[in-house]
Amino acid sequence: MYPTLLAQSSGGAGSYSSLIFIVLLFVVFYFLLIRPQRRRQQQHQQLVDSIKVDDEVITVSGIYGIVRFIGEEDMQLEIAPDTTIRILKSAVARKVTPDVDEEEEEEEEDYEDRNEEEAEPIELERKEEEPR
């Protein structure tokens, strides 16, 4: 009779530790998998909501196109002159932004133009090295 009581009392402590383990496992899964996935879904939804007609986009399959029509669940992309395709909104991967290099070049040209008049040539003195 005593061995069964001991087995029952130790079984209760084991169930608490396994319950704690399961809760910790769920917390780890939440922070490593569920939460980042929800964040990505929200960012993608914001991207899809921000698309307007005449925006250039890239689809998940890598097709570049200009948005010509936006419906409730789909949109039409012009991928070549007089060639449009119909895709789901969720198939848009990202918007195409202007090249950063072109913007930087324009800024550099403006900066050079402004400083061209102000800049004076700098003469450097050369030191002759002594023979060893």
Image (cartoon, rainbow, N blue to C red):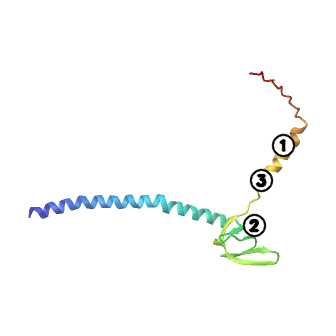
Whether residue 105 sits left or right of residue 76 in the image: it is: right
Secondary structure under badge 1? helix
Q: Are marks 3 and 1 in contact (CB under 8 Å)?
A: no
> Which residue appears at 71% of the width and 66% of the height?
51
Residue 24 rendering spot, x and y as whole percentages: 38, 58
Give the residue number, with chain letter if any, for mark 1. 111
Disc 3, SS: helix
- What residue is at 44 percent from the left and 61 percent from the top? 29
Mark 2 and mark 3: Cα distance apart in space: 18 Å
Q: Specify which label sits upstream in the sequence, 1 or 2.
A: 2
Horizontal arrangement in the rendering, residue 13 relative to residue 52 (left or right): left
* Residue that mark 3 sits on: 101
* Residue 75 percent across, percent down from the top left: 71, 75
Mark 1 burial class by Cα count in 10 Å: few <14, some 14-19, many 20+: few
Residue drawn 20% across and 59% down? 10
Q: Position of residue 9 (x, y in %)?
A: 18, 60
Residue at the image position 82 percent from the left and 78 percent from the top = 82
9 is higher (above) or lower (below) than 120: below
